[in-house]
Image: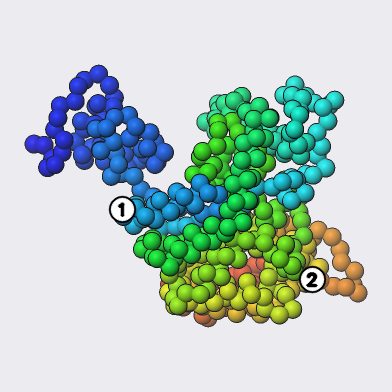
Amino acid sequence: MATPHQDTTPAEPGTIVEFLAGLPRELSGAIFAHLPNSDLKKLRLASRRLSKVVTPHLSFERVFISASNHNIQVSRNIANHETFRHDVREIVWDDARFMVSLEEESGYHTGYGYDAADSDSEDTPVPEGVSLWFVTACRENRDYLRKWRGRDVETLPQHVETARQLAAQLPLDVAYEYYGRLLRDQEEVLATAADSAAFEWALAEKRFPNLRRVTITPAAHGILFFPQYPTPMIRAFPYGFNYPLPRSWPTPPLGARIPCESWVGEAIKDKWRGFRIVTHLLAQQEYAIVPEVVIDGNQINSGLTCEIFSTQEPCEEYKNLAALVRKPGFSMLKLSIMVGMHAEQNYAAFRNGRLRQLLTADLESFALETDEVTNLSFSRPWPPENPVDHFTPLRSFFPVEAWTHLRHFGLSRFLVKENDLLDLLGALPDTLRSVELSFL
């Protein structure tokens, strides 16, 4: 018996498209449920009949906002679609902005120059009009991909795709011209604050009624050809597009450490522009219309500078974040913090009480990640006249007594003592369902 409302027009044999279009709805639904939107969109183009079958399976659980007109327009289109907007559960704010020189980015070795005389067989002469810093970044991207592969078998799918894209790299002058268009588009968005306006509009007009989470990240671009978040802008890149990977938040080069930034001056603070906008707008709400906030960056050893918690007087950004966390209905915070070279200050940001005050809220899920990479108690001797205590008692800044409904706790890359950690875990409430500890 045919399924009600199922198109029973017999499909002409001969193509897989016709076969898929003629499947019973239950069977085609089971197949399409496993396909990403990118594949479903391609199937829709195969035939008008198949498009009708595929379209109901498109789902947009995540939208992206950044300093890109493309990302903003796609998010607005979804927000204005009476079906798709109800699917959205998360807004990802891509806080990485394209650079105009390597000096703007700490994630590249700025001393790694390009010398045409020393170029290897992969390098080609630099075309006229292409900046050397752009060539340097592209070359370093390729070198990183070689290190990333290591001793892996070359036939692994990710390495096969890497080899294909490297073989299809755009000529340097073409890539540089395309990059220039991205920069000009970004400048237009920043000049008009179109990204901030789109986010504010979506909140004020409740365009995403099932929105649960906002994620702010500098790591959307991931590594070359493998983005952490494939935003519409990134998906539109030409195949084989090699470009300087933006972070904007301070990010150490591979294998290095950098000190955490101070929190003085607009130029420094605006490295975290998206974080400032999101927390400011969410703090203005009467209640937590977005109950979950993720401040990401741990994948690239980045995050908020811990100096936010140790300014002489509480800064506006700290106040906004604290106000947001204390909103009725707020339930989940994931916090990535940079503490590089903060040992010399005895980790003052964790000892002055501000982090504890921030976290004194009825949270159901909390995770803290830092960029700490070594056990400093063994890394070097400290003079007896200037002793440093690297270990901060965990319960001095984790207000476990306030977390009466906590269900998840996470801690990564933090200096701990075993007994102190066990004491903290033992004090967590009975509501706890999961604990994630790593690199302690």
Q: What residue type is labelled 2?
A: Gln
Query: 274 left or right of 314?
Result: left
Residue 268 at x, y percent in the picture: 72, 62
Q: Is residue 24 above or below residue 14?
A: below
Residue 38 at x, y percent in the picture: 41, 38
- Say few, some or many: other residues with alpha carbon within 10 Å of mark 1 (under 14 / 14 to 19 / 20 or more): few
Quadrant of the rendering where the C terminus is positioned: bottom right
Q: Residue at x 38, y 33 (%)?
A: 42
Quadrant of the rendering where the N terminus is positioned: top left
Residue tagged by mark 2? 345
Q: In this view, does 422 lie above or below 254?
A: below
Query: 6 left or right of 29?
Result: left
Q: Which residue is drawn at 76% across and 39% down?
A: 133
Along the line of sight, the residue nearer the viewer: 437 or 294: 294
Q: Is mark 1 on a helix, strand or loop?
A: loop
| Numbered tag placed on residue 373 in the rendering | none
Query: 304 left or right of 75?
Result: right
Query: 177 left or right of 340?
Result: left
- Residue with the most extreme left position: 1
Looking at the image, can residue 281 be seen?
A: yes
Quadrant of residue 359 in the image?
Answer: bottom right
- Say few, some or many: other residues with alpha carbon within 10 Å of mark 2 (under 14 / 14 to 19 / 20 or more): few
Residue 402 at x, y percent in the picture: 51, 80
Q: Which amino acid does label 1 sit on?
A: Thr
Along the line of sight, the residue nearer the viewer: 192 or 142: 192
Question: Which of the two discs, 2 and 1, labels the residue nearer the N terminus?
Answer: 1
Residue 117 at x, y percent in the picture: 85, 25
| Numbered tag placed on residue 83 in the rendering | 1
Along the line of sight, the residue nearer the viewer: 286 or 109: 286
Q: In this view, does 410 lie above or below 126?
A: below
Q: What element carries label 2?
A: helix
